């Protein structure tokens, strides 16, 4: 019987993708170990042929700034046993949501653009849309917290 | 395939930084429409930094992009220092050079080894590389190079992503001697592997030439990424950093969240290929002694952007070894900065090309205006032109739609676009 792997998806919404870059940097030292223990079922930074779940864990970076992102996050929640908010934008909505605190004059200037690209009036963190199981705050996240969480999920899902 | 109708629609590109899509139409064998849509959602940084103190701005704009964060730090710092008449010390300049060398090693390695290498081996992902033998060794070496870049950034600048030590007028922390020695050892250890990858990219990469384009880079005598004059390849002249906006024309791309640019009406490319085409004779002397591939430049083969990045990794290793070996870093006194109403421009070379910052400060040192011109936005017009030309050429070579679609993605990856950077702002008139 093939060994059970932790099935993960990595997703990004509105953000600088700094946590994705940090995740890619963590591969420098963990790639060969994780290749044996993790199935990267959806990870666009690593592969083109991705599958939309189901996932043991979905790691989600970025805040929600459009209706489409909101719908995709809701879908993701349904197909993921655990959903993790990764980084400051996912956890708090900031700094991606800096326009939430723009003055009325500044908001007036960006209004046509918000309408043209179907952007939400307010940018929100993940927890405003779905239940979040774990959070990795920071801009970017703290690498050891991510590694600790991966280990915890490995135990929880019977991978090691 | 000659007279067929077909569409290529890529909803969401993979193995690039950020989110982009492509719609391409071919009718009766002719490419009639190419739309590269960058749909990374805008975060309005240019407005967000309005009213913020000059001291806070670099760490804010660093958040435009994870992978290019150190480049945004350096561009904004240089811009503010030029506005306030601050001259960084020689030591600070060396530390900034080392920071950008680290970023270039790490960032080029991510692009070349995670995104491009699978294309060269006809695979979807490095995850499909064999678990032993040549392919396994290749991935092992690739990750070691990437890790060395990460380590250089971390030890010198405090972190590989959003590094905390670079600041206006100073470097907040200096690396200790034993750390410098450790870095030299690590860089020397990966040098042979980096050279091996240069040979591999020279031998295995694809060919698509686009002869009627220009290249632009901010260059200097030491091939430092801190920039200087802005030079063109075909027109053969350089312009000063200040006043750069007069030469660049913005192009609104209505279906994209990014803005395109042309230089005196000509589409142009920025990035490693542009730097090599304009300035490869200034690579580090050890790099030039070791490699012969720099003879392939100037080149109009877009895929040579990959080879240029591989060569730049070796240059960054050699340049960093020299800077670390000859330096004895000491904590320097903090420069006194007096805010005043002023205007500044800062131009540097980010991994993906020339990055322009233009800002005005008010008398308290708060930002009253900012304009950022980003490498991927500058390349957007040319990327569409290159995709259209390549598809047209492959149709005449009787390639299948599947082969063409695969190469479209490979060609876009060769430009190494960064969508997070391209959509940072909304152009507005400021009072």
Image (spheres, helix red, strand yellow):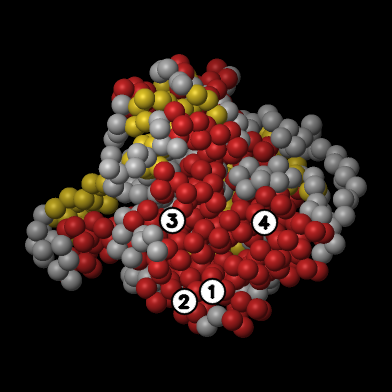
Numbered tag placed on residue B195 in the rendering: 1
Numbered tag placed on residue B152 in the rendering: 4
Asked which secondary structure carries label 1, the reply is helix
Tell me the quarter of the image containing the C terminus of chain B.
top right
Q: Nearer the viewer, residue A19 or B86?
A: A19
Give the residue displayed 75% in from the left and 37% down from the top: B55
Give the residue displayed 66% in from the left and 63% down from the top: B186
Are the residues flagged by discs 2 and 3 in contact, CB closer than 8 Å? no
Real-space Cα separation, disc 4 to disc 1, in angstroms: 19 Å
Real-space Cα separation, disc 2 to disc 3, in angstroms: 18 Å
Are the residues flagged by discs 4 and 1 in contact, CB closer than 8 Å? no
Numbered tag placed on residue B114 in the rendering: 3
User: Would you name the residue on which mark 2 appears?
Assistant: B199
Asked which secondary structure carries label 3, the reply is helix
Real-space Cα separation, disc 2 to disc 4, in angstroms: 24 Å
Residue B211: x and y in percent read 37, 72
Q: Judge the density around disc 1: few (<14), some (14-19), many (≥20) Cα neighbours within 10 Å.
A: some
């Amino acid at each position: 019987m093939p060994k059970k792997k932790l099935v993960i998806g990595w997703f990004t919404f509105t953000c600088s993708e700094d946590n994705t870059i940090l995740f890619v940097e963590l591969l420098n030292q963990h790639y060969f170990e994780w290749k044996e223990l993790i199935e990267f079922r959806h990870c666009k930074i690593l592969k083109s042929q991705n599958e939309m779940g189901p996932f043991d864990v979905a790691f989600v970076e970025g805040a929600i700034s459009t209706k489409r992102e909101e719908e995709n996050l809701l879908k993701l929640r349904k197909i993921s046993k655990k959903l993790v908010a990764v980084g400051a934008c996912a956890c708090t909505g900031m700094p991606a949501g800096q326009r939430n605190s723009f003055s009325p004059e500044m908001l007036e200037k960006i209004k046509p653009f918000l309408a043209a690209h179907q952007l939400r009036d307010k940018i929100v963190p993940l927890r405003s849309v779905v239940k979040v199981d774990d959070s990795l705050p920071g801009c970017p996240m703290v690498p050891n917290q991510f590694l600790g969480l991966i280990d915890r999920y490995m135990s929880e899902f019977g991978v090691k | 395939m000659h007279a067929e109708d077909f569409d290529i629609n890529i909803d969401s590109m993979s193995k690039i930084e950020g989110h982009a899509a492509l719609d391409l139409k071919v009718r009766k064998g002719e490419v009639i429409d190419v739309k590269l849509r960058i749909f990374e959602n805008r975060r309005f940084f240019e407005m967000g930094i309005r009213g913020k103190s000059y001291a806070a701005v670099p760490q804010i704009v660093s958040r435009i992009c994870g992978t290019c964060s150190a480049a945004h730090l350096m561009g904004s710092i240089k811009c503010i220092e030029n506005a306030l008449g601050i001259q960084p010390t020689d030591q600070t300049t060396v530390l900034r050079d080392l920071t950008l060398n680290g970023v270039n090693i790490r960032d080029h390695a991510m692009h070349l080894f995670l995104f491009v290498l699978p294309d060269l081996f006809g695979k979807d992902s490095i995850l499909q590389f064999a678990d032993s033998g040549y392919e396994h060794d290749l991935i092992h070496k690739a990750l070691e190079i990437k890790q060395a870049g990460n380590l250089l950034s971390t030890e010198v600048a405090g972190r590989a992503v959003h590094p905390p030590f670079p600041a206006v007028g100073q470097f907040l922390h200096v690396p200790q001697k034993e750390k410098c020695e450790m870095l030299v050892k690590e860089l020397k250890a990966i040098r042979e592997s980096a050279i091996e990858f240069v040979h591999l990219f020279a031998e295995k990469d694809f060919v698509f030439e686009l002869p009627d384009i220009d290249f632009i880079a901010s260059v200097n005598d030491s091939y430092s990424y801190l920039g200087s004059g802005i030079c063109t390849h075909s027109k053969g002249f350089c312009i000063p950093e200040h006043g750069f906006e007069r030469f660049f024309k913005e192009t609104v791309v209505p279906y994209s969240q990014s803005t395109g640019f042309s230089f005196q009406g000509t589409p142009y490319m920025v990035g490693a290929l542009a730097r090599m085409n304009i300035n490869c004779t200034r690579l580090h002397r050890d790099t030039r002694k070791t490699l012969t591939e720099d003879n392939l430049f100037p080149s109009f083969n877009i895929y040579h952007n990959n080879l240029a990045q591989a060569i730049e990794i070796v240059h960054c290793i050699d340049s960093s070894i020299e800077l670390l070996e000859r330096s004895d870093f000491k904590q320097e006194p903090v420069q006194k900065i007096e805010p005043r109403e002023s205007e500044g421009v800062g131009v540097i070379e980010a991994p993906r090309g020339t990055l322009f910052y233009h800002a005005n400060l008010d008398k308290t040192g708060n930002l009253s205006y900012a304009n950022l011109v980003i490498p991927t936005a500058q390349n957007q017009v040319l990327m569409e032109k290159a995709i259209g030309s390549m598809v047209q050429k492959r149709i005449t070579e009787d390639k299948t739609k599947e082969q063409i679609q695969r190469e479209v993605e490979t060609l876009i990856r060769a430009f190494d676009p960064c969508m997070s950077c391209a959509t940072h702002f909304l152009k507005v008139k400021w009072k």
